[in-house]
Each structure stands twice: as C-alpha cells, then as structure tokens.
Image (cartoon, rainbow, N blue to C red):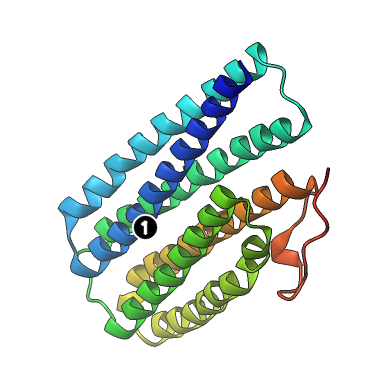
Amino acid sequence: MRDAFHAELDALVDTLLSMGDTVIEMLDRSLTSLSRHDLELADRTIRTDNVVDTSYEDVQHSVIRIMALQAPVASDLRLISAMTHVNIHLERMGDYAATIAKMGKLSAGYRDEPELTDQLHEMGRIARRVARQALTSFAHRDVAAAWQLSAVDAQVNQLNIGMFHRLVRLAAEDESRLEWATHMILVARQIERWSDHAVDIGESTIFVVTGQTVELSSNAPDARPAPAAS
C-alpha cells in the first residue's frame, strides 16, 4: 500500500518536472517569436499555456485526493505541500511566458533595437538556467543547488534594471519609440518575475529536506543550508 502511495508521489513529481520543461520551452519560444516577429509561434506559445493550466489542475486534484485517502507522515506531508507550491509557481511561469508572447504580437509592427533585444534574450537564457537548476534541485532534493539559485537570479535582476533605464532613455529621446519601449519594459519585467518563481521552487526543495521555510531572494548568496530535519 505504501509502495503504491510513494509511486503516486513520484509520478506527481514527474508531472511537475514535465511542466517545468514546458514552461522553459515557452519562455524560449516567446522570446524567439518576439525577436523574429513570428506571430504564429507567439500564438502557439500562448496556446501552450492552456496545457500548463490543465496540468496544474490535474496536480491540484491529485494532491487533494492523496490527502483525503492516504495518511502521509511528516516527510511525505512536506513533499505534498512543496508540490502544491511548485505547481503554483510553474503555472505562473507559464502565464508570464504567454504574456511575453502577447507583447511580441503587440510589438510586431515596430522597429526593434537589436542590442536591447539581445539583452532580453540574455535575460531569458539566464532565467532558463535558474529554472533548470531549480527543477533539478527539486527532483534530487539537492539543497546546495537550491541555495545557489539567488546568486544566478541576481544576474537577471541586474539586467532588468539596466533594461529599464536604457528603455526609459530611449523613449525620452525618441517619442515615437515610447510604445515599443513600454512593451519591452513589460517583457523584461515578465522575465524577471518568471525567474523569481523559479527561485521559489528552490525554496520548496529546502522545505522538503529541512522542514524550514526560507526566502532565498533575501539571503546572501554564500548562505549555507541548515541541517536536514528528521
């Protein structure tokens, strides 16, 4: 009976990891559609968010059923709680990627600034690295990898600040670029929030292993994990 229970938990973790792969691909596609003015790719990315939403609902229903039918012990309860939070973060990440695709559609008729567009892709590349590391840390209960996430995410935050200032200057110098610059500010903000949610997945890893609730974004990058809870 317990073997079947843990097999069900493992299957839910696999579902979450698959969702993670999907939202990572969504972010990549949304930025590609933005730079290439590819409206069809943008639409496909937006539709993929429906797949993520369906997976989110399936996981939530499975968690409720497990809680109703099983008697999880402390460590299992931590995992179930963490899965609920990871599920929420992944659903939000899908929403952010879809919003970027929508911004790409709105910006398709405007002239790009190649250097700024390249910076958005660099933000996306680092954000996807954060997400991959976060998902790997959750899959393998790797607390050390989770604690490293905020240092990587800090690069996304710095690029976001730099993008904001450059886009504001661009809009001030050329009023005709105001609408495009506003859209790109929103895109950069979506990437930054996407990455923040990936960091939050690392917080769930730490909770599963140690039982402690932490805020990685407010901890120093060289902080060390506490001893695991029994």
Q: How many marks?
A: 1
Residue 64: where, in percent of width, then height? 60, 20
Considering only vertical position in the picture, is 34 above or below 79?
below
Horizontal side of 54 relative to 82 (left or right) equals: left
For disc 1, the marked residue is 27
Q: Residue at x 52, y 62 (%)?
A: 133
Residue toward you, 19 or 159:
19
Q: Quadrant of the N terminus?
A: top right
- Tag 1: Cα neighbours inside 10 Å, few (<14), some, or many (≥20)? many
Tag 1: amino acid: Leu
Residue 11: where, in percent of width, then height? 48, 31
Q: Residue at x 82, y 59 (%)?
A: 226
Q: Residue at x 51, y 74 (%)?
A: 160
Q: Residue at x 58, y 16 (%)?
A: 65
Considering only vertical position in the picture, is 199 above or below 177?
above
Q: Quadrant of the C terminus?
A: top right
Horizontal side of 127 relative to 97 (left or right) equals: right
Considering only vertical position in the picture, is 164 above or below 107?
below
Horizontal side of 31 relative to 221 (left or right) equals: left
Considering only vertical position in the picture, is 107 above or below 95?
below
Residue 129: where, in percent of width, then height? 46, 66
Place residue 29 in its image quadrant: bottom left
Place residue 18 in its image quadrant: top left
In the picture as drawn, the residue positioned furthest to the bottom comes out as: 173
